[in-house]
Image (cartoon, grey):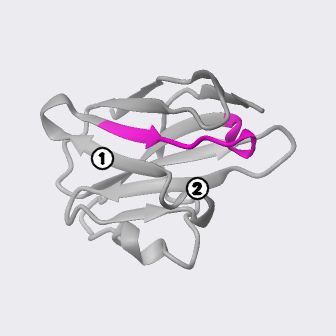
């Protein structure tokens, strides 16, 4: 059973930085992707970033490109989302999620550039962590 634990949210002023962490356990699959989604009450969940285990490719939502960086530490089974130059529009509950390849190759995260990252296919979710950016 895959379990994800998200942490690192908090209150920060506009222009500040936060680093979110997603600690994963039970990821025994060779091919998987870890993603960050965010959601504001009343709005649809939005795919922010993902990273593929097989080729290390990444995806970023256009509005966070150049400000957010996703990375992984395989030794710690943890994926990070470094968020710099935060804006009030980044305020949301952030969730990490895992998609696993069960006998088939997953689409690499880079595929979603220009297409948008969808939550469909992400079977495992961590609890949300709230990020609040004040103006």
Q: Is residue 68 above or below residue 78?
A: below
Residue 46 picture location, percent across and down: 66, 54
Whole-number angstrom distance, CA of label 1 to CA of label 2: 16 Å
Disc sitting over residue 71 in the figure: 1
**78 up-or-down from 85: above or below:** above
Q: Is residue 126 left or right of residue 39?
A: left
Residue at the extreme left:
75
Q: Residue at left 47%, top 49%?
A: 68
Q: Residue furthest right?
A: 42
Q: Earlier in the sequence, mark 1 or mark 2?
A: 2
**Which image quadrant: the C terminus?**
top right
Residue 83 part of the magenta segment: yes
For the image, the number of numbered tags is 2
Mark 1 surroundings within 10 Å by alpha-carbon count, few (fewer than 14), some (14 through 19), many (20 or more): some
Q: Residue at x 23, y 56 (%)?
A: 53
Badge number at residue 56? none
Dot 2 surroundings within 10 Å: few (below 14), some, or many (20 or more)?
many
Work out whether residue 132 or residue 127 is closer to the camera in this orientation and state it.
Answer: 132
SS state under label 1: strand
Q: Which residue is mark 2?
A: 47
Q: Nearer the viewer, residue 19 or 106?
A: 19
State which region is magenta: 79-92
Q: Quadrant of residue 78?
A: top left
Dot 2 lies on which element? strand
Q: Position of residue 26 (x, y in %)?
A: 25, 33
Front residue of 19 and 25: 19
- Residue 126 appears left or right of 13: left
Question: Which quadrant would the N terminus be assigned to in this image?
Answer: top left
Query: Viewer-nearest of labels 1 and 2?
Result: 1
Image spot of residue 66 (x, y percent):
48, 59
């Amino acid at each position: 059973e895959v379990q994800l634990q998200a942490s690192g949210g908090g209150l920060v002023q506009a222009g500040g930085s936060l680093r979110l962490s997603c600690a994963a356990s039970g990821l025994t699959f060779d091919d998987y992707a870890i993603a960050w989604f965010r959601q504001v009450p009343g709005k649809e969940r939005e795919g922010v970033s993902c990273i593929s285990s097989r080729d290390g490719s990444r995806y970023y939502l256009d509005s966070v490109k150049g400000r957010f960086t996703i990375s992984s530490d395989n030794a710690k089974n943890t994926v990070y989302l470094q968020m710099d130059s935060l804006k009030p529009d980044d305020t949301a509950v952030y969730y990490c999620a895992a998609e696993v390849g069960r006998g088939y190759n997953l689409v690499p995260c880079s595929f979603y550039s220009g297409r948008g990252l969808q939550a469909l296919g992400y079977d495992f979710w961590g609890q949300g962590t709230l990020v609040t950016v004040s103006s």
